[in-house]
Amino acid sequence: MTAANRELKRVARAHRRLSSADSFDDAEDAWADFLAHANKVYLKLRAACHGQGLDWMWWRKIMDERRDDPLLAYIHHARNSDTHRLEETVEWIPIGAHTVQVPGLGDVATGPHLRALPVTDKDVVYLPPTEHFGGPIPYPQADAISALATRYLDELVIAATFRLR
């Protein structure tokens, strides 16, 4: 579990860098690091479960979650696209280029951020997620996606730690 925890720390560090980035280059680097380390959390957990009967069945359930949940599937395929294709997985939205409706205030301009783009993996296009385990994701902002995924991966590693002793 040490290896999965090490990758989880790298996921959290990449998320913090993404959230505080003030340039496209810094944000894009943090996003790529986030995607790579999120994938490595799964790889380390899979290695820990390999050949362990009941734990392997638990692992299959986790893989089903990653396939079926729009956010988890998206980060998996975004990582593959970022690694194996030439298209961008995110775009830079400058300050004021995106607004949100705030009750009592009207339209409020957002700060600069990365917006997740559709990604292609093995000739299948995956749209940015609009939900995570049934909860809505109203806008595909990369740091919001990474925050939700980081929280999920943290809970996953904790659950694995108790299972794989």
Image (cartoon, rainbow, N blue to C red):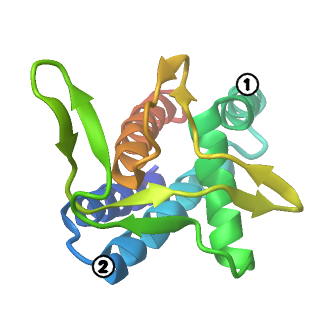
**Which secondary structure, mark 1?**
helix
Residue 54: numbered disc: 1
In the depicted view, which residue is nearer to us: 73 or 91?
Answer: 91
Is the residue 99 above or below the residue 40 in the image?
A: above
State whether residue 108 appears in this view.
Answer: yes
* Nearest to N terminus: mark 1 or mark 2: 2
Identify the residue at horizontal 47%, vertical 23% (top origin): 136
**Where is residue 86 shown, x and y percent of the image?**
70, 82
In the depicted view, which residue is nearer to us: 144 or 58?
Answer: 144
Q: In the current view of this chain or complex, which residue is farthest to the right? A: 123
Q: In the current view of this chain or complex, which residue is farthest to the left? A: 104
Q: Which residue is mark 2?
A: 26
Q: CA distance from mark 1 to mark 2?
A: 42 Å
Badge 2 crowding class, 10 Å Cα cut-off, few under 14, some 14 to 19, many 20 or more, is few
Is the residue 7 above or below the residue 161 in the image?
A: below
Identify the residue at horizontal 26%, vertical 78% (top origin): 23
**Where is residue 69 shown, x and y percent of the image?**
64, 30
Badge 1 crowding class, 10 Å Cα cut-off, few under 14, some 14 to 19, many 20 or more, is few
Identify the residue at horizontal 39%, vertical 69% (top origin): 92
Would residue 75 be found to the left or right of residue 157 on screen? right
**Where is residue 61 shown, x and y percent of the image?**
72, 26
In the depicted view, which residue is nearer to us: 137 or 62?
Answer: 137
Q: Amino acid at mark 2?
A: Asp
Q: Amino acid at mark 1?
A: Leu
